[in-house]
Amino acid sequence: MQQLKRIFIGRPLKSSEEGNQKLGKLKALAMLSSDALSSVAYGTEQIVLVLTQLSIAAIWYSLPIAAFVLILLLALTLSYRQIIHAYPGGGGAYKVSSDNLGKNAGLVAGGSLLIDYMLTVSVSVSAGAEAITSAVPALYGHQVGISLVIIIILMLMNLRGMSESASFLMIPVYLFVGSITLMIGVGLYKIFTGVIPFKAAASVGTAVPGITMALIFRAFSSGSSSLTGVEAISNAVPFFKKPRARHAAETLAIMALILGAFFAGITFLNYWYGIVPEAKVTVLSQVASHTFGHGFLFYLVQFATAFILAVAANTGFSAFPVLAYNLARDKFLPHNYMDRGDRLGYSNGILTLAIGSGALIVLFNGVTANLIPLYAVGVFIPFTLSQSGMIVKWFKERPKGWFGKSAANFVGALISFAILLILFIYRIKDIWPFFIIMPLVIFIFYKIHDHYHKVAEQLRLEDTDAVLHHFEGATIIVLISNITQVTKAALSYAESIGDYVIAVHVSTDENPGKEKEIQSTFKVDFPDVRFVDVHSNYRSIAKPLVRFTQVISRNALRRNYSTTVLIPQFIPKKHWQQTLHNQTALRLRQAFSHKENIVVATYSYHLKK
Amino acid sequence: MQQLKRIFIGRPLKSSEEGNQKLGKLKALAMLSSDALSSVAYGTEQIVLVLTQLSIAAIWYSLPIAAFVLILLLALTLSYRQIIHAYPGGGGAYKVSSDNLGKNAGLVAGGSLLIDYMLTVSVSVSAGAEAITSAVPALYGHQVGISLVIIIILMLMNLRGMSESASFLMIPVYLFVGSITLMIGVGLYKIFTGVIPFKAAASVGTAVPGITMALIFRAFSSGSSSLTGVEAISNAVPFFKKPRARHAAETLAIMALILGAFFAGITFLNYWYGIVPEAKVTVLSQVASHTFGHGFLFYLVQFATAFILAVAANTGFSAFPVLAYNLARDKFLPHNYMDRGDRLGYSNGILTLAIGSGALIVLFNGVTANLIPLYAVGVFIPFTLSQSGMIVKWFKERPKGWFGKSAANFVGALISFAILLILFIYRIKDIWPFFIIMPLVIFIFYKIHDHYHKVAEQLRLEDTDAVLHHFEGATIIVLISNITQVTKAALSYAESIGDYVIAVHVSTDENPGKEKEIQSTFKVDFPDVRFVDVHSNYRSIAKPLVRFTQVISRNALRRNYSTTVLIPQFIPKKHWQQTLHNQTALRLRQAFSHKENIVVATYSYHLKK
């Protein structure tokens, strides 16, 4: 077990080794931008899909809609840059909302993000698996299995530690950036040199009968799925090299620039080429084949797309554990999420995310499309909240240039909120589970918080109160099953700590007469120790023992004695041999562990052979 | 958890309630014969399949081959009746072989049977699942899932207790017996009245070119798979009502009669009707449709067959745990197999069987055919050994009529051994895993036995040796993480049992300065107790604590003091809240549990709110 752990996770790191694990800009871009950048694989397609429900001529509307998405991207980027500087400790929407809009808004943001990170992993991994099965048709039908394998690989990488996985992730991200840049560059060159003629179904400005604002809104809300993931960097500021905030803000700007250029480029090429969505071939793949033909470069784009989608899931693995840590520190999630693993990662957060996203994959049978509306809701709620929070902050603090800053946040908040409204109105059939899950999550947050609060109150020790209770003596109850070397050693120990030692044996109907035999042997061997036999009608020996011990304990308390139950066990020489012995000691410990005024001690006798 | 257990398993039974759980003959037949009887669903088919590899004309050889199988059945039945009377305590081949042929032969028999019972469950359940999917084509492709569900249902029924499941099992077994009896009766009637004419491909005695003894041997060895399961009753004698041996022997005779009649009848009808095996329709199903046409009675036979195949698996569930108990009692398997559950069943045996057979289903992807040769080897090894054992017994004891008795056993042993030889020669491709698994199982048996022997030797206490060691005092090490009510209570307790109390705190790099704070608070609150701070470079607090404790323990030993480590913990009011707290106490207990000369005690502080 330990050795397996070493192989997959690596040697434990000292706490002081943490500094080495910090991210530079190039690594951070690889680590944190794959979610956002990989969105361009489906963003344009989502817009065109909605528009072509009306007619092919409506495709030209994708250009103004894309312009709006770019405005939203600009607003979000400016807003998140401000958040990074205002909150260098990370925490993103949860922290911003909590600080400026109050605890409830923070918890809504935090809860949405927790769910959303799981969806990020599920969506990206399942889309990646679909891309893989499209490339290797022999694997078709095993998408769920492939997705789960990818999740397990990502989980292990993250348990190993951040920096190493970032180095590895640079390959696919920069491969994707390079191949898409090349594709857009070559496409534009071929357009300007006239190699590829204008083939759009209808040029910009053509009147399209039946076009409505509702349709355009829906197309816009679908297209905004390209923006999922832009918040990731603001959550992960503590992982950057110093000066953390500046490095993070610059990384965000670079990422937004690439994302905007890719999205605009792909949407324009799609319009110019006159591409119509097909069931089995993605829009991005059609753009690539129009640009490159069906050669090496086409396959490079396909491969890079599949790869970055699989990698996008990793964004969730870096953001979720930090958010869970922050929620746990504020006592809204179990403390376990604050534990660091051997390699300095927040192991429990990583494991929870892997299990949760794996379950989503299985539940939705690995079909990406059904997850996407939920995913958008989970993203735009914290977007709206964190930007509203920033507006409040500027109004409160009024630093230099606060009006301009708040204007950027205001535009961002407004557009995000508008998208949410559009989603609530036009997508309610897909997003209803959200209205069940969110209140439940908030309820759990409060239940946990309340519990921790009560515990702390009960455990607090006032100085005036800090005087030890003085017991008059100690009663020790030693459990006996046979009379062996273990019994002797345990009784010797019991006499060293106790003023009154009782040996107890439980007899059952299974071995009639055994109690007499044991009793007489005991009297001969240890004449000075009191021996009691308790009879059980069931095979369980725990219940009668607990009942007997409680009686003894009440008597002891009356005499101001403490009560200890001593469970003797022997430890075989080799570890595997432990499984050959009845787990009685373990079961008894469990039976006693919740009894008041009884201390449970285990005496271990070590075998030499 | 406890409530779920109640619903599925039922209320616990007293040991003295065991008498009520005994089986009468009719119930026992239902419980123990389904494995043997259900074999007729494929027995004839296996013979004909081998013969038709040569030509359709060879089918008439199935009649003399069936006659040989019936002779084998007669010999086995006589032999097992004698075993039942000679060994009323049950245990079957394992016991007979151990007693008469020595420990090694017994272990080979026992090991073969353990594996074979798993195969019984896997084969029957997967064949039953195939029958179900044949009846309900919509379920096709889910055989593995259906098989696992059936295994889980059988497991739960057996954990509930024997008698209740036997009552339930009477329905399918008697339904099968009734419908097959009706089928053979109607078939013979229609033949004698001339309604169904003689259509055999070639009548008995026709010369078949190319026929060899090898082919006939192979057909015979395949047909002998009909006899799997006849030993079940001899293993389960203790479950019968008194007089146990007589009831068991009579039940065996009834079962053999039914089995023989069914096998002979189906083989004859198959010959008369001129049926040739088909890929998708079983021979039994063809016989039924020739006899009844495609009406209600045809579907009844199909349904009853599917049902009894599912139920046949239950034979394994009654025999495996008893055999595991016997092996555990003789110290060849872990003692856990001797533990009785709440409902008096040997729960661990039942669980092991369910897991093992489920794994076989998954490994062999639910395909019955591949499992059958292994299954036959697993059956005929103990058959051969137990009958050889009986011959040795008769020669040793020479009771009245010993020569006749040993003759029956001799014929049985000879035919069983011949089948084994045929299997080894003609089926080595399918049965090779047996030659890896068996030596491994025997090796494990001996490893376990050796270990138990050594342990008993080391634990034995001689009278002369039984004097308690007198310690001069007790050192108590109390682990401290914060200064709370728990700390205070634990220290009070520690003073009640100890002569020298030390409080230990571990500080890490995570919270620099915390150790100073805790130290000074501690000095103020508990000035009389020694306080030690141990520093850890890792997040693990267990390792430095163990190291520190071992130093203290060595010093204590030098002064003839005992050493106790006291781990304080608090118990929240509600059980679910336990998960919200760090499992530190548990982890520390584990870290200390294997250290010599250190007793680990847990102080539990109970919260009221």
Image (spheres, coloured by chain):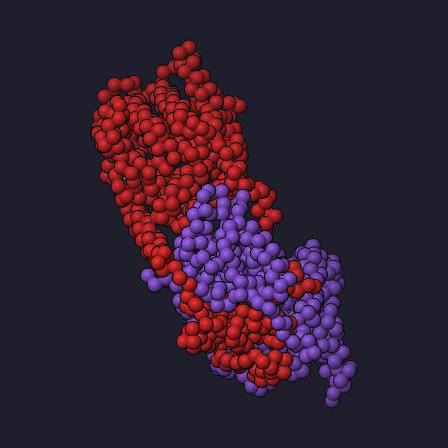
Chain colours: A purple, B red
Task: Measuring from the top left, give residue B249's x and y in whole percent.
Answer: 38, 26
Q: Quadrant of residue A594?
A: bottom right
- Most extreme residue toward the top is B193
Nearer to me, B101 or A556? A556
Task: Measuring from the top left, give residue B136's x and y in whole percent.
Answer: 52, 35
As drawn, is B146 to the left or to the right of B279? right
Nearer to me, B589 or B457? B457
Task: Measuring from the top left, give residue B367's x and y in whole percent.
Answer: 41, 41
The relative height of residue A148 versus residue B165 in the rendered view (above or below) is: below
Residue drawn at (29%, 18%) of the image? B203
Q: Quadrant of residue A359?
A: bottom right
Residue drawn at (46%, 29%) of the image? B241
Nearer to me, B441 or A117? B441
Residue drawn at (72%, 77%) of the image? A99
As drawn, is A345 to the left or to the right of A408? left
Residue drawn at (59%, 65%) of the image? A562
Nearer to me, A136 or A416? A416
Q: Is residue B309 visible?
A: no
The quarter in which the C terminus of chain B is drawn is: bottom right
The relative height of residue B572 versus residue B364 in the rendered view (above or below) is: below
